[in-house]
Every structure is written in C-alpha cells, then in structure tokens.
Amino acid sequence: MLTWSTDSLPAHERFAYWREERGKQLFGVSIELPPERRHLFHGRLSAQPIGGATLASLNASAYEVSRTEADIARVSTDSLMIGLQVAGPGWCDTPAGQTFIDAGTVAIGHADLPSQGMPTTTGDFHIHMLTIPLGRIARGQEAARRLYLAPVQQERHARLVDAALCALIEDAPGIAPDAADAAITDIANLALMTRGALTPGLPEVRQALRSAHRHAAIRIMRRNLHRGALPPETVADALGISLRQLHLVFEPTGRSYHRTLSAIRVEMACRRLGTRPDQSIADIAFACGFESLATFYRAIRQLTGRTPGDFRGR
C-alpha cells in the first residue's frame, strides 16, 4: 500500500509537490488553488492494488481539479472510476452537463473523459476512489467508455454501490485474492448497471445485486443491533426487497440471516469487551441486542469457543 502526506514537507512546498507529483503524475489531473491559500494546504492519500483495481482514499484541502485532454493524453488508464464523496461538496462539469456532488454521493464515470471539479467550500474534502481497468470487465466496455463522470441518480442504487464499496474498504486489509477479484467484478457490474451500461437481467448483474444487497443488509443490521429483536422483515422493507430475496442473498455465505445477525452481535460484543473495561458484561450484551445473558454466553461460546471474560483487556 502507498501512503503519503504533506506533513513531511515544509508548508511552502506542500501544494506544489501535491500538484506536480500526486496530481499530475500519479492521478493525471490538473489542480489549482489560489496563491494566498497555498501555504495552508495539506493532503494525505493512501492507495492499494486490489483485485486488479486500485483503491485510493484522499483527504486534502479543497482545490479545483480538472482532467483535461492533455492530462488524458499524458496519463491514460481506460478505467471505470467509482468515487464516494465522504466530505467536501462541489460541482462537477463535463461535456454532458454540470452536476452537484454532495457529501455521501456516489459518482461513476470513465476515467479518460474530461471533467472539472469545483468545491463549494474552502474546507477539507475526503473521497474514496476505486479505479477498475476495463480489461477486467467482461461486458459493457464500449458503453463504459462513453460514461462522463456523474452521480448515481437513483437513491436505492446509490445506497447499494455505497454499501458494496464500503464493505470492500473495510475488508481490503486482509481480503483473499479470490474474494478481492469477486468483489471488484461485482462492484464493476453494479456500477455499470446503475449508469445504464448493463441491464439488470444479466446473470452477472443479478449476482452483483445479490452481493450489494447483502452488504447493505449487514450495514442495516450493524446500525440497529441495539434494537434487540431485528426481524428479517424489517431489513427487507428497508432494502425494498421481498423477504424471500433477503434470505436468498445470504445463501452463498453459508449463513442464514439469523446466524449472520448473531455473528455480528458477537463480533461487536467482543470488540466492546476488549475496549470498554468499565462497562459490565451484562450492559455490553444488552447494548448489542442480546435478550438475555444466557443467550449471549451461548452465542459467544458457539462462535468463538470462549467466554466473555476471555475478551477482557484484549
């Protein structure tokens, strides 16, 4: 993994280095910042190869960024770009029109088409960006090459891409090569479907949708552990799918909805047992949604072979 920040440079050199070495040479973009703000500039990035793609995260002071014809000629990637704007809203201009990229927005487009980004604030921005070479994609390559960068319009589709991308980011440090390949393929097919480059009925798109719905379901489950009973009907309704569809998305994992929910509760409880020594075992169990201490002890023993006390201070 590549990690780098401007902290190691003198303040007056940070923006120039970021613009030339990170912007122009690494990402193939042109960036600008008013001279009076350059001495305040700071930036941090990480990037790692994963499943034949590149997963990057950028945190930096706001600046204008463009991908010009000259930039494309100098650094051409023929890749699908999927970005999640975590913070720092702004406008995106392309020959296809102008769109607003708000915090929480997922944007998708071909990396070798011109675009210009203009921040609406002077605060920092934070973006996760997945770049997938089109050579990894079995279908939709020509359609992908015509996709100017734009946000996903349908909220439901945006949530699915967001969930799949965030799951990849979370799993990336220890993900196995086969799992990485499958995750990248699913995200690429899902992204192309959301932009109309692939049809929902294709087998690879159905697979991508099942995977994304599973990630989205797990996200909902984690956010609602404190609620105790979390029936599958509640999660299915939140996803806008049928109860049967919800159960089907968990089949490839070998774990049912209920077993997955129990495993998530145990995972959270074990983490809290090790990081919150001032909180009682009972309080942690109930905060993670277990209905009784007996149920908690039984679940943690079944899944880890240990007792709650074994995780104290770890």
Image: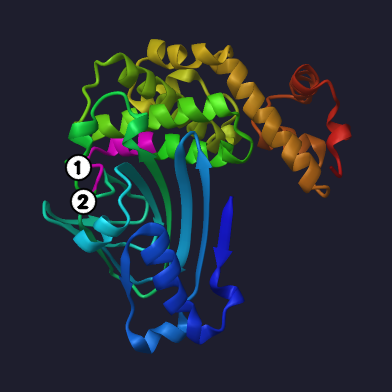
Residue 154, given in percent of the width and then of the height, sits at 24, 37
* Label pair 2/1, CB-CB below 8 angstroms: yes
- The quadrant where residue 282 appears: top right
- Name which residue lies at 27% across and 32% down: 192
- Label of residue 113 in the image: 2
Residue 51, given in percent of the width and then of the height, sits at 49, 33
Sooner in the amino-acid sequence: mark 2 or mark 1: 2
Q: Which stretch did the figure color magenta?
A: 150-161
Give the SS element for disc 1.
loop
Residue 215, given in percent of the width and then of the height, sits at 47, 29
Q: Is residue 278 magenta?
A: no
Q: Say whether residue 10 is left or right of residue 39.
A: right
Residue highlighted by disc 1:
147
Colour option used: rainbow
Residue 112, given in percent of the width and then of the height, sits at 25, 49
At label 2, the amino acid type is Leu
Q: Is residue 51 at least partly visible in the picture? A: yes
Mark 2–mark 1 distance (CA, rounded to whole Å): 8 Å
- Number of residues whose C-alpha sits closer than 10 Å to that of mark 2, classed few (under 14), some (14–19) or many (20 or more): many
- Label of residue 12 in the image: none
